[in-house]
Image: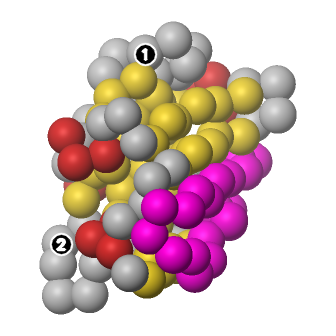
Amino acid sequence: QVQLVDSGGGRVQAGDSLRLSCAASGDTFTLYAMAWFRQAPGKEREFVAGVSRGGQSTYYTDSVKGRFTISRDNTKNSMYLQMNSLKPEDTAVYYCAAQRAIGVPARTPEVYSSWGQGTQVTISS
């Protein structure tokens, strides 16, 4: 089971950028499809972006397409989320997640076996 530590959150203004990082350890990183989820107060945890095991395929929820970029560096056992043109509605706790599986990263949180501790992203208008 891989262990995950996410970081990089903060408080910025609308239109600014942030880069989240997720460091993995404890298992073979390339066995895992990876994803970012977020959870705002009073809302369910939602899928933000996912990346395949090799990093060639990426997937996004519609609200972040064109603004966010997910990537991974398998040589560093790390995953990233570059967030540009941030909006107040992007405010949430962001979590990285790992799914030991082949194929498309799932969009439902229940199938993910490992989670980071979460990093707060706050966007002020």
Residue topped by disc 1: 57
Q: Which residues are magenta?
A: 5-26
Relative to 1, is 52 above or below?
above
Q: Earlier in the sequence, mark 1 or mark 2?
A: 2
Which residue lies most toward the right here? 76
Q: Residue 30, how many percent across, how many down?
A: 63, 23
Residue topped by disc 2: 44
Q: Residue 45, how many percent across, how many down?
A: 25, 67
| 36 within the magenta span | no
Instruction: Identify the residue at image location x=51%, y=36%.
Output: 70
Instruction: Identify the residue at image location x=27%, y=71%.
Output: 89
Q: Residue 37, how many percent across, how many down?
A: 37, 57
Q: Residue 13, how many percent across, how many down?
A: 51, 75
Q: Quadrant of the C terminus?
A: bottom left
| 9 within the magenta span | yes
Residue type highlighted by circle 2 = Glu
Residue 8 showing in the rendered view: yes
Specify the quadrant of the image occupied by residue 14: bottom left
Mark 1 and mark 2: Cα distance apart in space: 25 Å
